[in-house]
Image (cartoon, rainbow, N blue to C red):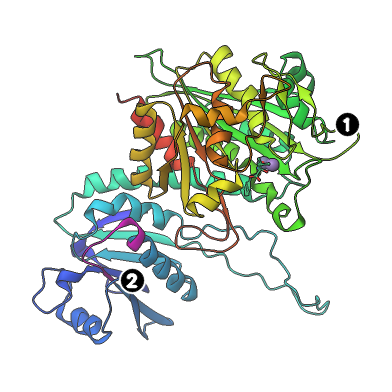
Amino acid sequence: MQFQPFDVLPKDARTTVFLLGEDNYKEGGHSALTGEQLAGILALCLKPGKVGTIKSAAREGLKADVYALLPKELTYDKLEELMAEVASTLRTLKAKQVDIALLDDSLKDLSAAFYKQLALVDDGFSHYKTTGIDPIDPQQDKQEDEAFSPTFTLYLPKSMDQKAEEKTAKQAKKLAEGIRITRRLVNEPANVMSPKRLAQEASELAKKHGFEIEVFDEQQIQDMGMQAFYSVAKGSDAPPRFMVMRYMNNQDTKQVLALVGKGLTYDSGGYALKPAAGMDTMFCDMGGAGAVIGAISTLAMLKAKVNVVAIVAACENMISGHAYRNGDIIGSLAGKFIEVVNTDAEGRLTLADAITYAATVIKADKIIDIATLTGAVGVALGNQITGVVADDEGIWEAISAASSKSGDKVWRLPHFDHLAKSNQSERADIKNSGGRMAGTATAALFCRAFAFGVPWGHLDIAGTAYSDKASAKAPLGATGIGAEILTLAAVKLFEQ
Ligand code: BES
Ligand code: MN
Ligand code: ZN
């Protein structure tokens, strides 16, 4: 993404996107449109929030001017929808070099979101889409689809501070890169993204972006006493991995924030087997892990003044002769005995040990966990709102502030004491499911039982991590939820 002042707008550009505020969509409006351009755009009879294209002949091929009219009350959602339309227009045009002209400053307050959206226009999970459904013709050369990956030059009006915008765009690009990392990790199927592979990917990211990583293997996980985590992991032939990533870049404080991500590379449900209809997307059950790895990578890219430790207990929940059962009573790193009433409530068991590790080994001052934890959160909030439970106002406020900057919606659910009592077991210290009622809150409070009283927050992304349809927010597949919220929340928590 390059920036240019307005007066050098190229005359011979092939694809130009003009963005204009609703107020200036008239003759004599305060925009940088020339009379000819204005006449062209008025002829399109654009509606606010809509995109129109004028094509004309150019020296080589076609020239396309794409006009988009920004609605008067521009919100994050409306900008996202508009940008999705702009992106699909550019895709149809197979645009390579795109000049974007902001004709006025009407998206000033949302410019960070705008730059992020531009940085993500070409993202998508397509590397397994190669020859398509038709029989392969042995005679014909394979025709490669040209990748859509446009480069942008931005032209800003004088009323916008170019230096400041360049800085905002640089940051936005890093946030977008974090989202891409999370999406890529989550989109890979479970036969590819095993616990071992996830640890390898995290190690490569650590080297590339500059954070530390320690990876513990199956034997070390057992030796450390992570009995709850290992009980879930032992049913699979794919060995588990425990990852601890550190980005310590704030010497002014000893405060440490732990980010704990659920890392089920596959969740079959175990002996409480899931129905087929709910099982085929369960490779996304490491969405929390993807988010914390994306976030710590972004924090390192931003050189953020934070001390963050990201923790992932990665394994598969499978069925076999060595799998755990419904009715088992298992130990845990914290020393609590857990009655396993449902092997499909496995995520909280892996989180229990990871959170205990954060509280007792890392001695974190604050813990935020993030997990595709309960179907119930989707029933309560749908697939565009992440459920949050927190016992600390500062953590909640940081998450909430981060979400309004990232455009991801969050909603807080309660953590009353009586809800925690649903996890009371008759046979052991605690049971791994408090039943259907208030299932998201009780699952969260199970996790909290392993936090040793450390201020804690919890994001349930089971509804928001993965979508089987493309939307204005994200392409089909992993949404990348969490990477940006956690990054911004971490930065915020270290500003206080
Ligand atoms: N991984 C699932 C939750 C999930 C559901 C993630 C849908 C993504 C989309 C989790 O491990 C699970 O199975 N939860 C159970 C808990 C129940 C057994 C108490 C659920 O929500 O049904
Ligand atoms: Mn499950
Ligand atoms: Zn799960």
Q: Amino acid at mark 2?
A: Thr
- Say which label, 1 or 2, has the lower sequence index: 2
Q: Quadrant of residue 359?
A: top right
- Which residue shows up at 15% across the image and 70% down it? 23
- In this view, the residue in front, 329 or 210, is 329
- In this view, the residue in front, 387 or 47, is 387
Q: Which quadrant, please, contains the C terminus?
A: top left
In the displayed structure image, the side of residue 1 where residue 186 appears, left or right: right
- Verify CB contact (< 8 Å) between mark 1 and mark 2: no
Any atom of ligand 1 within 8 Å of the CB at mark 2? no
Residue 45 is marked as none
- Which residue shows up at 50% across the image and 38% down it? 459
User: What's the CA distance linking mark 1 and mark 2?
Assistant: 61 Å
Give the image location of residue 458, x and y in percent.
Answer: 49, 33
Q: Quadrant of residue 126?
A: bottom right
Q: Residues within 10 Å of mark 1 (few under 14, many from 20)?
A: few
In the displayed structure image, the side of residue 436 where residue 15 appears, left or right: left
Q: Which residue is mark 2?
A: 16
In the displayed structure image, the side of residue 226 where residue 1 appears, left or right: left
In the displayed structure image, the side of residue 486 where residue 9 appears, left or right: left
Residue 257, compared with residue 399, is above or below; it is: above
Q: Which residue is mark 1?
A: 322
- Which residue shows up at 41% across the image and 82% down it? 62
Q: In the rendered picture of this protein, how many numbered marks are placed on residues?
A: 2
Give the image location of residue 282, x and y in percent.
Answer: 69, 49
Q: Which residues are magenta?
A: 69-78
Question: Does the magenta-highlighted stretch encompass residue 70?
Answer: yes
Q: Amino acid at mark 1?
A: His
